[in-house]
Image: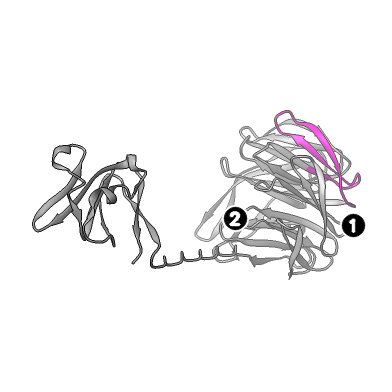
Amino acid sequence: MANWGGDSISVIDAATNMAVGEPIPVGSRPIGIAVNPVGGTVYVTHGVDNSVWAMHIEVTDGSIEGIGAFPIAVSSGSDGIAVNASTNRIYVAHSGSTRVSVIDGATNDVVDTVEVGTAPAGVAVNATLNRVYVTNRVDNTVSVIDGATNDVVETVPVGGQPEGVAVNRALNRVYVANNWDNTVSVIDGATNDVVETVPVGDSPMGVDATPINNRVYVANENSNTVSVIDGATNTVVDTVDVGLVPRGVSVEHVTYRVYVANFDEGTVSVIEDLPEAEPEPEPEPEPLPGTTENVPLQGGVCNPVATTYPDSTPIGTIADAVTPIAMLDSLWQFESGMWTGWSAEFPEASDLTHVDFLDVVFVCVEGAATFTRPVP
């Protein structure tokens, strides 16, 4: 968590929901944090310094330390930040300009600068499509950047003063928090059209989405709540009270916990939103007497199949009950100390018209097959 007033970041243990050690000092007014899973580098943006800090964090005996921390020179007013782990690129929005910096995660060098709208704030990445989405506060738009070329391929009008932005890759939907309108714009990532506008709380800021349960979480800074949106229906399904002036929100995809940064309290609210359990499948109805049932057969072995065929039924009739018949390898019955039946290897000893089947037949098949028998 970035501590704006403390010029530091805090690390929270997800197992205990407790802060680990003392805050780590960074540059002036830290505002955005992103972790690059390629190498485990933590990037911190600053609202005052013209830099992004890159560091590795080491946890030892309950204490934490920033290892190898160094600033990366960027444009003024760095704000939102996001990582595309697939391309090892980091994108930084500079709210005091019209630019987004592109950092190479392998070298931590700025390799490109992209012109977007005025006062870019939030950044989100769809790694599947290599698309980057940037909210522009003054223009009330979202710039769509092609990560392969670093060109703006679309500018999407949204609501008033868009702040946070998040992506659900499973649905290919982009969610934009419109601070002045008290709404969330839902953009179809395939067409770059706004397909829905969802009313939420007062002055939404941060937003995050998860494909696990298709939920979208929106931090409403002036109502001290988090709106929970169902991504399948684009409706608010819950409103959760949190601390004072919530601004940032992030979903942890292993524990299904949602972490909300409360700006005026210096606290983090933790919400648990477990996915609903899948309903148990309805049991198959018992077959009725006088009907038939299908018994699955395992290929490569001889399956003992109890039947209810009448006595003296020719074993050829039993053979015809195997589907597909091409999978049938042999049929055997054990009675009075003798095996009788049919095998393709011994046709002269397998007269199906004269061998009767009484109790149990061993059905041998070469692949997946079924055996149809009457229900008593």
Magenta residue span: 134-160
Q: Within the magenta stretch, is there residue 181? A: no
Q: Which is nearer the N-term, disc 2 or disc 1?
A: 1
User: Disc 1 marks which amino acid?
Assistant: Trp
Please give left or right for residue 188 compared with residue 9 in the image. right
Mark 1, other Cα within 10 Å: few <14 / some 14–19 / many ≥20: some
Q: What mark, if any, has residue 228 been given in the picture? A: none
Asked if residue 195 lies left or right of residue 125, the reply is: right
Vertical placement of 193 versus 146: above or below? below
Q: Residue 180 carries which label?
A: 1
Percent position of residue 199, x then y: 84, 61
Q: Name the residue under label 2.
A: 253
Query: x, y percentage for residue 241?
Result: 74, 71
Q: Which residue does the image show at 19% across and 54% down from the upper left?
A: 356
Q: Quadrant of residue 192?
A: top right
| x then y, percent, for residue 361 | 23, 54
